[in-house]
Image: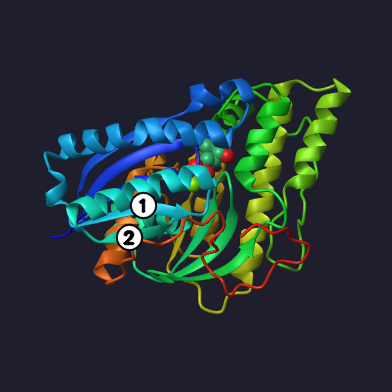
Amino acid sequence: MPIILGLESSCDETAAAIVRSDRTILAHALAGQDDHHRAFGGVVPEIAARAHCELMMPLVETALADAGLALTDIDAIAATAGPGLIGGVMVGLVTAKALAMAADKPLIAVNHLEGHALSPRLIDADLQFPYLLLLVSGGHCQLLRVRGVGQYDRLATTIDDAVGEAFDKTAKILSLGFPGGPAVEKAAAMGNAAAVPLPRPLLGAKEPHFSFAGLKSAVLRAFATGDYAPEDIAASFQAAVTDCLADRLEYSLSRMDHKPAALVVAGGVAANMAIRAMIEKIAARHAMRFVAPPLWLCTDNGAMIAWAGAERFAAGLTDPLDVAARPRWPLDPAAQPARGAGVKA
Ligand code: AMP
Ligand code: MG
C-alpha cells in the first residue's frame, strides 16, 4: 500500500505529514508562524519564506520519526507547488525535489486547492465523486463541482476579496488580534448581530459569484463612527458574511439540474461554527449529505497534501523534477472570468 510524504508551505503554516493510501495518517507535523507575523497584523511573505526554510526539514524528520519510517520507506513525495506566496511554495517544493532525488522516489506537485478539495475524502471513505465543494479560505472563496482527481468545474468565485481575507481585515480594523478569523468568531459570540447595519454584497444577484470588499469597507466605516462596540461589529460582520454565503450557495443550487449527493465545506473559514451550521442547514434543505473535515484538516496542513498526493499517485500522476512553483494556479483553467473580477485564480 503506497505511503506518501506531503509538504505544505504555501502561506504561514509549515507542515510535513505521512499518509498511507488506506487513509491511515501515519504522522502529521505542523508549525505555525503566528509569532513571526503577529507584530505586522498579517503574513509577511519574506518572513514566511525564511521561517519555512528553518522549519521544513526538522518537521520532515519529526514526521518520519513519528511514523517510525525511513525516507526509503516512502513511495512518493508530494508538495504544494502553488498557488500561494511564491517564496514559501518554492521552499517546500525544492525540499520535496531534493528528497525525491536523494531517495530516487517520484515527485508529485500538488495544487494547494486540490489539497483542500480532496481532504474530506481522507477522513470519509464514503465520499464519492462528484460532490459540491464550498472552498472558503484566506486566499479563496469558490464553489466547485469536484468530478474526480484533477477534474474540477469552478461554478463561482469571489470578484474581489477572499472570505478569510475579509475576516482577517475585520480583525485588524477592530484590533482583535492575529490570526483574525478565530478572533472575530470569538468576539462575535459576545456581540449583537443586529446592532450594526452592514451591506450584503451581491445578495439576490442573478449570477453565482461572491464579493466581500464592500463589506470590509463598511466595517471600517462603522468602526470609524465610534458608535459601535467591537463585539457588535464582529457579530454583525459574521452574520453578513453568513447571509452572503448562504444566498450565493442557494442561487447556484437552484440552478442545478443534477445536484451532487454531498455538499462539502473546506478551507480555513470552514472552522467557523456559524458558517458550518448555515451550510449544514442548506445541505439538509436540498437533501444533500453535509461533509466537513475536522478543524485541523480545514486549515492548512501536510496531511491534505499527502492525501492529494496519494490520490494522484493512484491515478498514475507524477511530475518531473523541473516542475515549476506557481504563485497562481486555478483548479479549473477553463472557467470564464467572473464579471468585474480581478486577476485572482
Ligand atoms: P487557509 O487559507 O485555508 O489556511 O485558512 C486561513 C483563513 O481562515 C484565514 O483567513 C483565517 O482568518 C480563516 N479562519 C480560520 N479560522 C476561522 C474562523 N473560526 N472563522 C472565520 N475564519 C477563520
Ligand atoms: Mg489554504
Does 35 appear above or below 77? above
Quarter of the image for the N terminus: give it: bottom left
Residue 166 is at least partly visible in this image: yes
Mark number, residue 126: none
Quarter of the image for the C terminus: give it: bottom right
Could you say which quadrant of the image residue 66 lies in?
A: top left
213 sits to left or right of 335: right
Q: Position of residue 254 (x, y in %)?
A: 63, 70
140 sits to left or right of 227: left
Residue 272 is at least partly visible in this image: no
Q: Position of residue 249 (x, y in %)?
A: 61, 60
The residue that appears at 58% across and 31% down in the rendered structure is 185
SS assignment at label 1:
strand
- Residue at which label 2 appears: 108
Residue type, numbered disc 1: Ala
SS assignment at label 2:
strand
The residue that appears at 57% across and 44% down in the rendered structure is 138
Find the residue positioned furthest to the bottom: 257
> Between marks 2 and 1, how big is the CA–CA gap?
7 Å
What colouring method underlies this structural image? Answer: rainbow
Q: Are marks 2 and 1 in contact (CB under 8 Å)?
A: yes
Q: Residues within 10 Å of mark 2 (few under 14, many from 20)?
A: many
- Asked whether 93 or 196 is in front, the reply is 93
Residue type, numbered disc 2: Ile
- Asked whether 206 or 166 is in front, the reply is 166
Q: Position of residue 65 (x, y in %)?
A: 16, 35
- Residue at which label 1 appears: 79
The residue that appears at 58% across and 48% down in the rendered structure is 139
- Asked whether 310 or 218 is in front, the reply is 310
186 sits to left or right of 105: right
- Asked whether 206 or 214 is in front, the reply is 214
Sooner in the amino-acid sequence: mark 2 or mark 1: 1
